[in-house]
Image (tube, coloured by chain):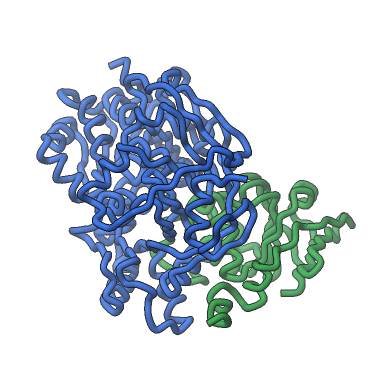
Chain colours: A blue, B green
Amino acid sequence: MGMTMTQKILADHAGLPEVKAGQLINARLDMVLANDITGPVSIKEFDKAGFDGVFDKSKISLVMDHFVPNKDIKSAEQCKTCRTFAKRFGIDHFYDAGEMGIEHALLPEKGIVASGEAIIGADSHTCTYGALGAFSTGVGSTDLCAGMASGMAWFKVPSALRFELTGKMPPFVSGKDVILHIIGMIGVDGALYKSMEFCGDGISNLSMDDRLTICNMAIEAGAKNGIFPVDDITREYMKGRVDRPYKEYSADPDAEYEKTYTIDLSTLRPTVSFPHLPENTRTIDEAKGVKIDQVVIGSCTNGRISDMRAAAEILKGRHKAAGIRVIVIPATQSIYKQCIHEGLIDIFIDAGCVVSTPTCGPCLGGYMGILADGEKCVSTTNRNFVGRMGAVTSEVYLASPQVAAASAVTGEITSPEDL
Amino acid sequence: MEEARGRVHKYGDNIDTDVIIPARYLNSSDPAELAAHCMVDIDPEFAGRVQQGDIIVGGENFGCGSSREHAPIAIKASGVSCVIAATFARIFYRNAINIGLPILESPEASRAIADGDEVEVDFQSGTIRDITTGEEFRAHPFPEFIRRIIDAGGLLASLREEA
């Protein structure tokens, strides 16, 4: 029996000729990642366990992105813990305020993750790097601690769902709409413990940013990982970023999938997830008219340059609706600079937006855009759970940068087609 | 880890880690501090009501969302002796095992057990007994590999044993 793309990467990293779904394996890791929330818990465990060294200082990333620049004394202490640890072991990829970006935008951008690699991160959206054809999954702080010490992690080999994408997305539809549509179709536990493998002739019409957004939200369907095949778009993206040899894997023709879904991208509509689960999707046509108080454009899901451009294109020469707040957060310093060079920051500020240094802040209700009682927000982030962005009674509507920007102009959920 | 016995706090499907421990409290990793805010956005009285040994029963996809290990830490530090659910989200499942919070998957128990019931769990046999109703359920047992981690006292302890 053939193996899925994920299974082939895992087999190689476990030093096995073959693995099967359900098999428990111990796999070698190419990169382990933590942030300022999960890092301190790992470091505490690391010290408690009495490890005297890390497995490889060039294969650990510590990115201070959640509550940075520090929102309060306790957050500052958490960063201090990470900073001290990074210095102690000479961690190569330590990113503090000024250099940091949102981790899942930063690592691909800097070429720290590449095709064929096995990556764990103490952050659930670590599954993002599947866009590059890597096996990449989120873990907790204890797994991360063990990974930093040993360079290994145990996995149950996942079975897989296949998503065959055909055709081309119409205008105003993006990778975000593709993944929201899929989550709406299979549910928040539709891919529980499984891989989501994307294939089909439609993927050649998806940019790397679209793919990163799609894999980013695989966790929102409960998946262990999401993964795209490696093609010219992947190779082009890694050129100049990844300076080490990398390996390209592809699924065997006779690989076993629990189910195959075929999605014609040309039939998709801009899609919005209503509170309080990402699976509560509606097309824009069924979503229009909800009055909002805030818009957030950014995050590890949609804070990349193409997201900024898409939002700016809609906001150019327009102004946000009276009485609402619009917060735009380029995900990395380099994206921020690109926005400045392209004049996007001018567009945002002229439209009445807040533009912030990279941070995860509002996405998880940390800071920089907390919602008050009963307030509603259209957000390009990834979760709309109860209380996710602030007050328990507040509501988050997940959407693409295009829909978020159009909604910012009118003050209610709006299709960019209607402006 | 032999057995657990306690009063049940029952919740529905898709209990996410944001309601188990909201991000506004993640500027700390102190177990007692996390426990003080456990479940606050879905059950504000939980922290005051929970007793040592109590059991949480959830539905499908318990612990979905963020990878924050603070979620099982908050539950464990609340005194909860076991979480029973129809299914668990995978990162939460790993985290619970790694920090030594016993969890059991049983769709039947998840459906039948009511809030406030007195429940007894035998981890060796995987038996869940609802003392209030007299009903008995069998949970999926842990695979051998996982049992070794738990017996060693968690992932890091098992790693040290192998070293």
Query: How many numbered dots are placed on residues in this image?
Result: 0
Residue A235 occupies quadrant: top left
Q: Is residue A93 visible?
A: yes
- Which quarter of the figure is the C terminus of chain A placed in? top left
Residue drawn at (27%, 64%) of the image: A93
- Vertical arrangement, residue A153 with respect to residue A273, above or below: below
Up-down: is A243 above or below B5?
above
Pinpoint residue A384: horizontal percent, then vertical percent: 46, 41
Q: At 68% from the left edge and 47% from the top edge, which residue is drawn?
A: B59
Q: Is residue A74 above or below residue B160?
A: above
Horizontal side of residue A332 vs B47, given as left or right: left
- Residue A142 placement (x, y as % from top left): 49, 69
Q: Where is residue A178 drawn, in percent x and y? A: 43, 30
Q: Can residue A390 be seen in this view?
A: no
B1 to the left or right of A166: right
Farthest residue in the top direction? A418
Q: Name the image quarter holding the N terminus of chain A.
A: top right
Query: Compared to A387, does A29 lie above or below?
Result: below
Q: Please report the residue visible at 33 percent of the width from the left and 30 percent of the height from the top.
A: A404
Which percent across, then down, holds residue A380? 36, 37
Q: Which residue lies furthest to the right in this view?
A: B134
Q: Which residue is drawn at 45% across and 18% down?
A: A267
